[in-house]
């Protein structure tokens, strides 16, 4: 495909990133956006000397082995690879926060460091977060407590677990590349449709409590550089701040719909894609509902959370930490209600597909995701599983009696 150089120059002067240039160019010429188009336009921009940013520089190394096409490139101008300290200094990553790191190099695709760090409270995040909390504090129409009336006709009551897992708001998947379309709009539609579908499928059961499990990669990235918390580059749709606000609105719409049915307990599971933003988001939601007595919150940074419903002990975790076979013993060690409950369950996430196994004393079950397969997952064959949002019904004395699945 031939590219119009003058038009690309004009777009680059008007747009903020090469990705934005590529998308706008595709839109004007009715071309399906893909990574290959973005890479070609990136090469044109760098070849013409339009880009002075090190992140998108295609300068070759002395060995002609790598190109600087990877986000957060670890290559210097002379083609040599930065040390981890140089890399952190260049990208203003606090070196003292780095726990582990791995140098990733790919022929023709550049080099970068995959860093696992302690939470880094970026100044931009903190300013955005503080302003948002202040705005929420001044909202006069925040939800107030609902007084519920229970009739004598209700004979059985149930706990409904609603768990929109691994929604990855901000993930980009192109049907042209993977056969699977996914973006911010689709993510929002699936979350709202999935929760509504679970409520409709359980309308015949009287629910006296709803456990809403939040977090679990609700957002796809955690930094302005379009990476996860650990620094892994992602294919993205939208800016980080826009996606944060989208996720906030989605949670409020979902919780408002749940509160019409029963009182809600909100549990936040920290996750690997959005460890920082996910925590901020859960705290914003907690602030928004602070005058509502029908909802309680568990929003600390513990990786495993526990909730007791009569004879049910329910654990939840993202699933990127402790191994499934270790969760029963961890539950016994960490929850004081272990001996009080006959039925024990652990709901985990992260792997985007269904597993369920009975261990001694605990059933561990992973949940499906509504998100599409991006380029990396498609190339590596992590595809083809049902996309869904799931819920569970728990009886007070009989444990989990139903699994509700809304498939897309």
Image (cartoon, rainbow, N blue to C red):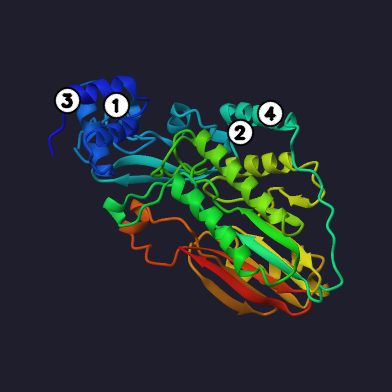
Task: Give the answer, above or below, for where 345 lies relative to 321.
Answer: below
* Mark toward the start of the polypeptide (2 vs 1): 1
Label 4 to label 1: alpha-carbon separation: 44 Å
In this rendering, does residue 66 appear at all? Answer: no
Quarter of the figure with residue 26: top left
CA gap between label 2 and label 1 equals: 30 Å
Question: Which mark is on residue 121?
Answer: 2
Q: Which mark lies nearer to you, 2 or 4?
A: 4
- State the residue in front, 300 or 150: 150
At horizontal 48% and vertical 58% (from top left) the residue drawn is 370
Q: Is residue 14 shown left or right of residue 360?
A: left
**Sequence order check: which comes first, mark 2 or mark 3?**
3
Tag 3 residue: 5
Q: Nearer the viewer, mark 4 or mark 1?
A: 4
Label 2, label 3: how far apart the Cα atoms are: 40 Å
Between the C-alphas of marks 4 and 3, the distance is 45 Å
Which numbered dot is residue 77?
A: 1
In the rendered structure, which disc, 4 or 3, sits on the residue that comes first in sequence? 3
Whether residue 53 is visible, yes or no, is: yes
Is the residue 313 above or below the residue 219 in the image?
below
Q: Residues within 10 Å of mark 4 (few under 14, many from 20)?
A: few
Q: Which residue is mark 4?
A: 135
**Residue 292 image offset from top left, x and y in percent:** 79, 45
Q: Real-space Cα distance between discs 3 and 1?
A: 25 Å
Residue 64: % across, % down? 19, 38
Classify mark 2: residues with Cα within 10 Å, few (<14), some (14-19) or many (20+).
few
């Amino acid at each position: 495909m031939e590219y119009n150089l003058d038009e690309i120059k004009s777009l680059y002067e008007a747009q903020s990133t090469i990705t934005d240039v590529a998308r706008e160019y595709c839109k004007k010429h009715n071309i399906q956006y893909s990574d290959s188009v973005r890479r070609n336009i990136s090469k044109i921009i760098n070849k013409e000397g339009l880009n002075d940013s090190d992140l998108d520089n295609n300068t070759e190394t002395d060995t002609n082995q790598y190109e600087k096409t990877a986000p957060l490139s670890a290559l210097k101008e002379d083609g040599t690879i930065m040390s981890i300290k140089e890399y952190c200094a260049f990208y203003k990553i606090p070196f003292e926060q780095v726990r582990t790191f791995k140098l990733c190099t790919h022929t023709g695709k550049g080099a970068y460091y995959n860093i696992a760090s302690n939470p880094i409270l970026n100044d931009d995040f903190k300013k955005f977060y503080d302003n948002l909390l202040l705005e929420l504090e001044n909202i006069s129409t925040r939800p107030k407590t609902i007084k519920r009336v229970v009739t004598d006709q209700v004979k059985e009551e149930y706990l409904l677990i609603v768990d929109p897992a691994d929604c990855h708001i901000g993930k980009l998947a192109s049907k042209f590349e993977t056969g699977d379309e996914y973006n911010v709009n689709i993510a929002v539609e699936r979350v709202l449709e999935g929760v509504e579908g679970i409520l409709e499928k359980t309308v015949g059961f009287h629910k006296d409590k709803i456990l809403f499990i939040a977090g679990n990669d609700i957002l796809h990235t955690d930094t302005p550089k379009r990476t996860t918390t650990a620094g892994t580059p992602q294919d993205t749709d939208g800016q980080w701040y826009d996606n944060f606000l989208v996720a906030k609105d989605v949670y409020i719409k979902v919780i408002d719909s749940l509160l019409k049915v029963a009182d809600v307990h909100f549990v936040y599971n920290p996750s690997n894609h959005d460890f920082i933003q996910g925590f901020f988001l859960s705290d914003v939601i907690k602030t928004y509902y602070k005058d509502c007595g029908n909802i309680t919150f568990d929003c600390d940074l513990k990786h495993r959370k526990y909730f007791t419903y009569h004879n049910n002990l329910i654990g939840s975790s993202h699933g990127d930490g402790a191994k499934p076979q270790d969760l029963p013993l961890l539950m016994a060690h960490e929850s004081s209600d272990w001996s009080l409950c006959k039925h024990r369950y652990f709901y985990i996430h992260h792997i985007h597909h269904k597993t369920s196994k009975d261990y001694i004393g605990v059933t561990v079950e992973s949940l499906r995701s509504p998100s599409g397969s991006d380029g990396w997952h498609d190339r590596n064959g992590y595809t083809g599983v049902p996309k869904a949002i799931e819920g569970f019904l728990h009886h007070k004395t009989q444990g989990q009696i139903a699994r509700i699945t809304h498939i897309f």
